[in-house]
Amino acid sequence: MAYHKVLGFDKEPFSTSPDPEFMHLTREHEVALTNILIELRLRRGLMVIFGDIGTGKTTLSRKLIQELRQRHDILFHMILNPSFETEEQFLSSVIRNFNIPHNVHSAAGAGEIMDLRDSVEKFLIHKTVYEKKTVVLIIDEAQKLNENILEALRLFLNFETNEYKLIQVVLLGQMELYPKVASMANFMDRISFKYTLHPLTFENTKAMIEFRMKKATDNPVPRVFLDEAIEEVYTVTGGYPRKINMLCHQILKELVVENQKIADRVFVKGVLDRQYGMRQSTGDEILQTSITNSGHSLIG
C-alpha cells in the first residue's frame, strides 16, 4: 500500500510535480494569473513573471495552461528549456512547435534567419487577423535566454496591427532574468505586465499545506500536522513552496515508518536530523542539501 494511503489520503498530497489541481493560489499567484489572462485577452504582447527558485513559477505556468486549454480561440506552446544558442535555433523551434509552414529559400546565415522570421510573421497574420486566434508563446526558465534570443523576442513584438500584438509572450524566470531585460531598454518598454513572486507567509504556508491535504482525499482530512509542526516547516523552508512540499513529503513518509499519525515540532526536527543530519544548521542550509540517492534536490 502506498504510504499516503496508510495516513488516509487517496493521492500523494505533497508531490513536487507542478500539478495545477494542487496549486494553492495565494493572493500573489491570483494577481499574477488574473493579470496575465487580462493581458492575453487584450493581446498586449509581453508579460514577465520573476521569482526565486521554488516560489511557484512553474506551477503558475501549468495553471495558466489549464486556463488556456479551455479557450478554443487560443493557440499556445510552452518552451521548458530555452537554452538556445542562436536566433536560428530559436526560430526553428517556434516554427516546428507551432507547425508553421516554412520552405528554405536562403543558405544558412542572415538570409535564412530572414526567411524564418518571414514565415513566423505570415503565420501570425493568418492566425490572428483572418482566423481571429490568439497565439501565445510561454517560456519557463527564461533566465536561460541569452541577449540574442531576447532580441528575437523583441522583434516578434514588432509584429502587430493597429490594435494589438500578433503574438503574446509570457516569460517566467528566476531573478537573474531581471538585469538581463533591464539592460535592454527597448525590451523593458514592451513589457505590458511584470510581477515578482515572493516566498509564502506563515499563514499562506499553513493554508497551502491544508489545501493540498484536502485535495488529496474525498474523505475528512486526516489531522497530520499540529500547528507547531507547521511553524517549524515554515521556519526551515522560509516559505518556499517547493521546499515546503519536499519537507512535508518526507514528514509523511517518516510518520508511516515510525508508525505515528501526527507530527509535532519535535517530530519535524527529528526528520530533519535523521534525513539530513543538520538539525543545528540554518533552515536554508538544510533545504539546500541534495537528496542525492534519489536524484532529487530540495531546491532543484
Image (cartoon, grey):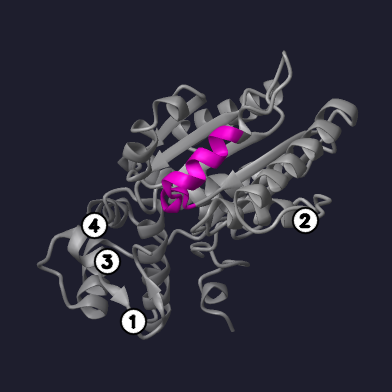
Which of the two labelled residues, at mark 2 and mark 4, occupies the earlier sequence position? 2
Q: CA distance from mark 4 to mark 1?
A: 20 Å
Disc 3 crowd rating (10 Å Cα; few below 14, some 14-19, many 20+) is: many
Q: Are marks 3 and 4 in contact (CB under 8 Å)?
A: yes
Q: Kindly identify the residue that appears in the image at 38 percent across and 43 percent down.
A: 177
Residue 160 part of the magenta-drawn span: no
Q: Residue type at mark 2: give it.
A: Val
Q: Residue type at mark 1: give it.
A: Thr
Give the quarter of the figure containing the C terminus. bottom left
Q: In the shown orientation, is residue 298 left or right of residue 138?
A: left
Q: Kindly identify the residue that appears in the image at 51 percent across and 78 percent down.
A: 3
Residue 147 screen position, x and y as percent: 42, 44
Which of the two labelled residues, at mark 3 and mark 2, occupies the earlier sequence position? 2
**Which SS class for mark 3?**
helix
Disc 4 crowd rating (10 Å Cα; few below 14, some 14-19, many 20+) is: many
Q: In the shown orientation, is residue 101 left or right of residue 251?
A: right
**Which SS class for mark 1?**
loop
Q: In the rendered structure, which segment of residues is drawn in magenta?
A: 141-155
Would you place residue 154 above or below residue 227 in this image? above
- Tell me the tag on residue 104: 2
Q: Are marks 3 and 2 in contact (CB under 8 Å)?
A: no
Residue under numbered circle 1 = 292
Which of the two labelled residues, at mark 1 and mark 2, occupies the earlier sequence position? 2
Residue 213 is at least partly visible in this image: yes
Q: Kindly identify the residue that appears in the image at 86 percent across and 28 percent down.
A: 132
- Tell me the tag on residue 268: 3
Furthest residue toward right: 130
Q: CA distance from mark 2 to mark 4?
A: 55 Å
Residue 146 part of the magenta-drawn span: yes
Q: Of discs 1 and 3, which sits in the foreground?
A: 1
Magenta part, dominant SS? helix
Q: Are marks 2 and 4 in contact (CB under 8 Å)?
A: no
